[in-house]
Image: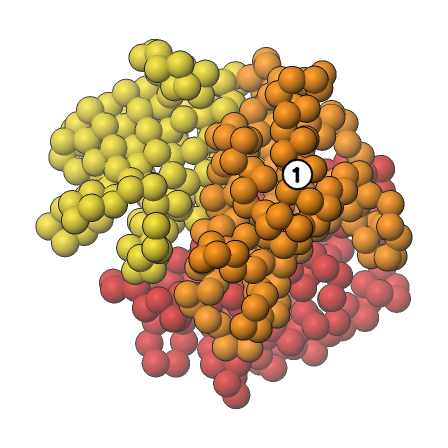
Chain colours: A red, B orange, C yellow
């Protein structure tokens, strides 16, 4: 497959804006990276590989994503922390005029209130991306995580 | 904002050359990534977010950066280690004909004399980049670090 | 050196496909990233820097790489794990009409059967890349690793 440079860098920019918005605690803007009808799913790698449906989080509309943030800000009890994503370059796995599929590896670090940083989760994003009124958005974001022992709460988005 | 592909990759290359020079122990070339009048600052995220001025390191000229390396090579006492930066793609946050502003997430790993590697610091670079006689250079590099417990000395540059 | 955007992104794509193939356990395709006559070497940074020849793994043909995978699938005894590479952008260090040399930093995380993830190894790839019948392939991949205490087996490729 010949690389479409512009598409690749557009997807990289979308991914980068997405993770930096989370890391910069701009969580209210997080749902806007998705289309109204969307799928956001956190699936342990073991289950994903065997096609088992159980997952940790599953939201199938932007409204559910908004709800998660309202809940995070107002109701949830969790460990306060900073989050930091390091993502590799996306690899575009399929593309037609309408959608782009991409796979991107990620590592998420958390810093606790004592100032210590540790690896929170590594995995890969399996994204389906569409052009929504001139802006690239996630129609699907499946986060397949290797780290299936989740020590702390999944409070902030992956 | 439409992505300027060439500017983005030029900034990515600058960032990459910068961190690889540090990791490859070419520290004498480190100050050359900056303009003569520059600002290099290491600010804990807590302070940065609340606009508090206290920071761990602050150098406001290339000469001060050179001084740090001379001191590192000749006077400082610190734990010998290897350093390894993994940086994401920069996100260009502003750009005019003269300067480019970019935000880039980083993770720094240190390997001690026993051969063990651990996360040393994660954070983000907030850079202001200018064209200095045909070469991109940092006019400002603010390293806002999440990891505010600094276990070991900040011997090598971030 | 003026950046050749297309070459840079082609190398980034090669690197990305390489590490994702490993992480996705598509190890049978791993040798295909190399030319028939090739060099794959894992060298501790200490030895590499002092030009000492001892290394952990050295394969000098694609057939040896294939052998490693057959051995991994059928004979080796090792800790089952998931692997995850996060690589930075490559930095092209030399290029002529025939070969491209590039340096790329990597961090490899391993997730054990208990679901816990830790840093396995950080280092840098020193690659020599050629066009082999229309496809970019590694003619040489020297993995210079900082993490010279290897706690667990080097079962899966770096």
Helix, strand or loop under label 1: helix
Q: How many marks?
A: 1
Q: Would residue A34 be seen by someone viewing this image from the given angle?
A: yes
Q: Which of B15 and A9 is in front in this view?
A: B15
Tag 1 residue: B63
Question: Which one is in front, B126 or A120?
Answer: B126
| Residue B3 picture location, percent across and down | 48, 72
**Relative to B129, residue C34 above or below:** above
**Which residue is painted at 74% across and 25% down in the image?**
B152
Residue B109 lies, in percent from the top left, at 60, 33
Q: Is residue A76 above or below residue B41?
A: below
Please identify the quadrant where the N terminus of chain B is shown.
bottom right
Q: Residue at x 86, y 57 (%)?
A: B51
Measured as percent of width and height from the top left, residue A59 is found at 64, 69
| Subunit under mark 1 | B
Q: Find residue B92 and report its image quarter.
A: bottom right
Q: Is residue A51 visible?
A: no
* Picture residue at 52% right of the left edge, 88% below the top: A133
């Amino acid at each position: 497959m010949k690389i479409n440079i512009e598409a690749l860098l557009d997807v990289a920019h979308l991914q980068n804006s997405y993770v930096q918005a989370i890391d910069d605690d701009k969580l209210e803007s997080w749902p806007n990276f998705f289309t109204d009808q969307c799928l956001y799913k956190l699936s342990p790698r073991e289950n994903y590989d065997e096609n088992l449906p159980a997952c940790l989080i599953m939201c199938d509309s932007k409204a559910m994503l908004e709800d998660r943030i309202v809940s995070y800000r107002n109701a949830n009890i969790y460990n306060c922390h900073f989050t930091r994503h390091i993502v590799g370059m996306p690899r575009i796995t399929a593309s037609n005029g309408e959608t782009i599929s991409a796979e991107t590896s990620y590592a998420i670090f958390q810093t606790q209130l004592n100032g210590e940083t540790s690896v929170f989760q590594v995995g890969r994003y399996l994204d389906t991306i569409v052009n929504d009124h001139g802006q690239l958005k996630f129609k699907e974001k499946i986060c397949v995580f290797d780290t299936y022992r989740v020590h702390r709460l999944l409070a902030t988005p992956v």
